[in-house]
Image: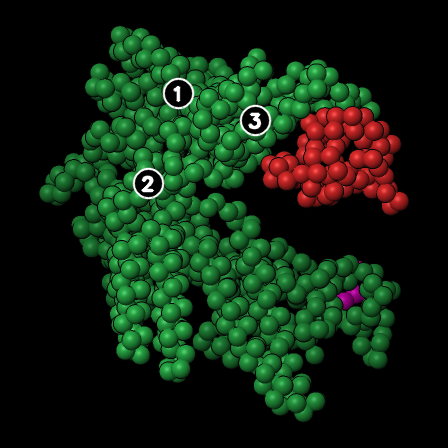
Amino acid sequence: VSVHRREDGTIVLAGPCMAEDAEPLLQLLQATPETSLDWVQCTFLHTAVLQVILAARTQPLGPCGDAWVARWVPDAPG
Amino acid sequence: MNGLHEQFVAEARDLIHQATDDLIAVERESASVDRIDRIFRAFHTLKGSAGVVELPAMVLMLHAGEDVMAAIHSGTLAVTSEIIDQALACLDQVSRWVDSFEAEGTIPLEAGTRGQIAAQTLRELLPKSTAAETAIRERFVEADTEALPGWVARLVQEQRETISPPIETRPESLLAVSYEPRPGCFFDGDDPLALMRAIPDLLAFQVAARDAWPPLGGLDPYACNLRFEAISAGGRSELERIFRLVPDQVRIIPVPFETVAPEQTVGSDGEALDLVRNLIEEQRRVLTASDQREDMAGRAGGVARAAANALRHIRRDPLATPIEQALKTAISRADVSPLHGALDAALAALASATFAADAPDGDAAQAVEPATDAAGPTASRVLRVGEDRIEALLNLAGELIVAKNNFAHLARRIEKEMGEQDFARAVRRENDAIERLAGEMYAAILQLRLVPVAQAFRAFPRLVRDIAHRLGKKVALVTHGETTEADKTVVDRLFEPLLHLLRNALDHGIEGPETRHAAGKPGEATVTLRASRLGDRFVVEVSDDGCGIDPDVVRRRAAGGQFLAADELAALSDAQALNLIFAPGFSTAAKVSDISGRGVGMDVVRTMVEQLGGQVSVNSGVGTGTTVRLELPMNIALTRIMAVEIGGQVFGIPLDAVTETVRLSPDRIGQIKGNEGVVLRDRIVPICRLAEMMNVPTAPASEATHRLLVVIEAGGKVVAIEVDAIRDRFEAVLKPMQGLLSNARGYAGTTLLADGTILLVLDIKELLP
């Protein structure tokens, strides 16, 4: 799965994260808004997933595995 | 305030100052086309930036001012004193609004009305037809090339730091893209980010919420609420192809190349030059450093390569080639001197280029360096850094020096306690290296604090104009040496004494027009502000060509006060007598009946200058004028001081040593081995009576009252010092003990208080048992 929670509670994005991953990511973030998000393993980020990350105002543990996002999306979202 | 607002405030202040200076120059000298053009552009730029930070009242008023300048520029309106007054009043208003914008993030509510009235007043200065024409022309200009839409201006401003446009190809214009996908786009399988990824030659990118984000609980993950913005150096047709399916959601707007990167293409040259010059000097030292033959070729090769690359980097290729040729000669002859010569030649060429780049008009710099002929502003690129950041750096460097000192101590211990002489020597050697570096760093940071004295001077043309008007006198202010640099604190604090001196010169020094005519002087008086360097000091002189000060009048005046006995007064030379005007209290005597020349507040000037560690003197000729000379340190190090009172006397304690002050009831204080002590934060802190240490007579503390302790930490010891009262805290320049006291132990120095008394500042380390 592209979106899952590690034992330590961190939410992990891995591989290509497509539009359908936005919903489960949002549910995880809603359950634990303070938790950290690791997107190092993410190889592709869909707009819908990015939108959830921005809306949650979370600071992902970077750099993002999607090189274009790592280059152009600012570190501090929101 | 965000970065954009800070930048607006700083830029606006610069423009206001510049336009004010130019307006006064126009009035005093002539309305040259250049000057009017500069004023016009200042109003124009101010108007533009006010629009970006959304201050419509300011835009309205500045627009009217801009129209007036445009009319003067086109020759349909002649400059009058009234126009200058109105334009200055307009800038004053802008200045006040900028202040309140900085302080409160907004401008007052009544600004709208005020702006309208001011705009009205300005427009009434315009000839009727011009007013109409200008309005039409403006509308056309706005619609054509002018005002970038707000979002583009904001994007450019916010991303300016990161945008690095392709200087080599230098396209006519860049393209700004704004893309707001439809909320339902995800259901159609769209990935808007994918379109942004496809933009060629992307220079800047931003993504933000279109409407504010709802709480996470209420977020619909499949309703797109994003706005993408970007700047691209790619072609328009390519962008249109990418966004062909969503034309209704995207806007593409050309951005003139200069808007995005004027500074990067031009001004940084001066700094780069300096860097390269330092680098080549360093290489020259490397070359001289050792004369071992065997590695000569390698060393020379490295030196030549580094120098040539650096020169190529700043596009001084013609200077690089001779260095490489000299390298070949040097290797073939096994002698480094040809390379030496080539490096020297390059340095000389660079030195003249730097000088040219420093020239105010920048023309010469462009002659040397054709690559910098861009149409952008010629001002050198300046990094704005908050004073507090430099202060923090300075403190760190100070701490580094203190930490470094421990190494010397460590080396001694290694030698004494461990008997490791070689190791101790190695530590000492490293200590020397760190010492040199820390010292250089400290000096370099002090250099950062140097600002041109022009910063203190620039308000004066306006002030002199206004004061002269009020007094009905004609006065020209001439300034020299505005580029002389000194520590920011010195320059900042220079303003007040200079203002006092200028006021005095205008009020008392300079005669009315009739008197001047009768004395055969030109009707317009001249007041000169001159700054110059004198070794590690810098000197500011205020001169006037007024009536001068009569030393005999000063003597008579002084005889009335209690300054000196009659015979002492008679023994004073004229020059010594003149300097009596700085004596405390002299001014009060003078105020009663004006002495011919100077009056109020000369001792205030002296006090302010001495607080900066400077000196003041006066020179005057009856009928020919007066010169007051301020001699100041270029750098000052401020010490924070706490003043305390013991037995009726006041002493200073360096605040760095103070950890806390406590007020205790006597029962908290116990006897420890015959000495008084107190337990504070689980530590036993001995109490020292400062009165005893200083041999100051004091009444024995009555048992009932509270006792006041200043806890200090110095040299690894913690001690509480008992004092009678704590007075204020302040920053001051410490002057070393002088004269008889220079050998007195226990004092770090003296400083002058605002009331003119001298405060002795204690050296805590020396005093502690």
Q: Which label is found at residue B378?
A: 2
Magenta run includes residue B702: yes
Q: CA distance from mark 1 to mark 3?
A: 20 Å
Q: Which residue position holds label 1? A: B146
Q: Which label is found at residue B500?
A: none
Q: In x, y percent, where is residue B747?
A: 57, 72
Task: For the C terminus of chain B, give its image quadrant.
Answer: bottom right
Task: For the N terminus of chain B, give its image quadrant.
Answer: top right
Q: Is residue B612 visible?
A: no
Name the chain letter of the residue that bears numbered label 2.
Answer: B
Judging from the image, what is the letter of the chain drawn in green?
Answer: B
Apparent side of residue B127 relative to residue A71 in the rendered image (left or right): left
Marks 1 and 3, the one that precedes in the sequence: 1
Q: In x, y percent, where is residue B706?
A: 79, 60
The amino acid type, in three-letter code, at marker 1 is: Glu
Q: Is the residue under label 3 in contact with that under label 1 (CB below 8 Å)?
A: no
Q: CA distance from mark 2 to mark 3?
A: 30 Å
Name the chain letter of the residue that bears numbered label 3.
Answer: B
The amino acid type, in three-letter code, at marker 2 is: Thr
Q: Which residue position holds label 3? A: B229
Marks 2 and 3, the one that precedes in the sequence: 3
Magenta part mainly helix, strand or loop? loop
